[in-house]
Amino acid sequence: MITLREMKIEDYNEIIELWEHTEGMWLSEADSLPHIQTYLERNPYCSFVAEEQLDTQTTVLAGTLLAGHDGRRGYMYHLAVDPAYRGQRIATQLIEKAMKGLTDAGIDKCHIFVMATNVEGQHFWVANGWEKRDSFYVFSKDVPQH
C-alpha cells in the first residue's frame, strides 16, 4: 500500500537517486542537500514523498514532489514517480497534497517549470488541468557568490 507523508531531509539520498534516474528532470546545485534542507525548512507542509511499506523494516520510495511558495505564488519542482509505480495515481495524489499545503498557506496560484524537451511531462500537466502559458518568458541569472 502506498502512503504519502511530508518530505524530510533524511529522505535526501533516496530522493536524489530517484531524481537522477527520472527522464526529463534537470538537476543543479540548487538540488544539493543544504539547498533542499533550506527549502524544506522555509516551506513546511508543501513537499511530499510517496512510499510503500514492504515489511516492518523496509520502505521503498515510490515518488516525490518538491513544492513551496514565496508568500505570493506557489511553485512545484521535481514531481517524480518510480517507473515501477506509475499508473497508480501517485503523481496526482502528491499534487493534491502539495496544493492543499499551498492553499493552507494562503497561496492562490501555483506554477510548475517543465523542460521544453520534456514532452511527456508537458502532456501530463495539461491533462491534469494545468495551463501552458505562452504570455511570458522566464529569464534567469546566477546570483553572484561571495
Image: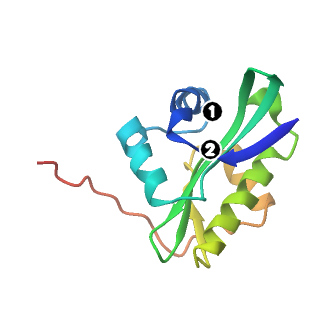
Q: Is residue 139 left or right of residue 13?
A: left
Q: Is residue 81 visible?
A: no
Dot label at residue 23:
1
x, y percent for residue 104: 64, 73
Displayed quadrant of residue 33: top left
Mark in the foreground, 1 or 2: 1
Residue 52, how many percent across, how many down? 80, 31
Q: Quadrant of residue 46?
A: bottom right
Please tell me whether mark 2 sits on a helix, a strand or a loop: loop
Residue 54 showing in the rendered view? yes
Mark number for residue 58? Answer: none
Residue at 68% x, 65% y is 99
- The local crowd at label 2, few if under 14, some if 14 to 19, many if 20 or more residues have their Cα within 10 Å, is few
The amino acid marked with disc number 2 is Asn
Q: Nearer the viewer, residue 62 or 127?
A: 62
Q: Is residue 98 left or right of residue 135?
A: right
Please say if 24 is above or below 56: below
- Residue at point 38%, 44% (across, down): 35
Residue at position x 80%, y 22% from top?
Answer: 56
Q: Depth check: give the residue in front, 18 or 142.
A: 18
State whether residue 134 is above or below residue 1.
below
User: Looking at the picture, which amino acid does disc 1 mark?
Assistant: Glu
Seen from this angle, which residue lies furthest front? 56
Label 1–label 2 contact, CB within 8 A:
yes
Query: Could you tell me how far apart the alpha carbons at marks 1 and 2 are, in whole angstroms?
Result: 8 Å
Towards the viewer: 23 or 51: 51
Q: Earlier in the sequence, mark 1 or mark 2?
A: 1
Residue highlighted by disc 2 = 118
Display coloring? rainbow
Provide residue 27's location: percent of width, then percent of height.
Answer: 46, 38
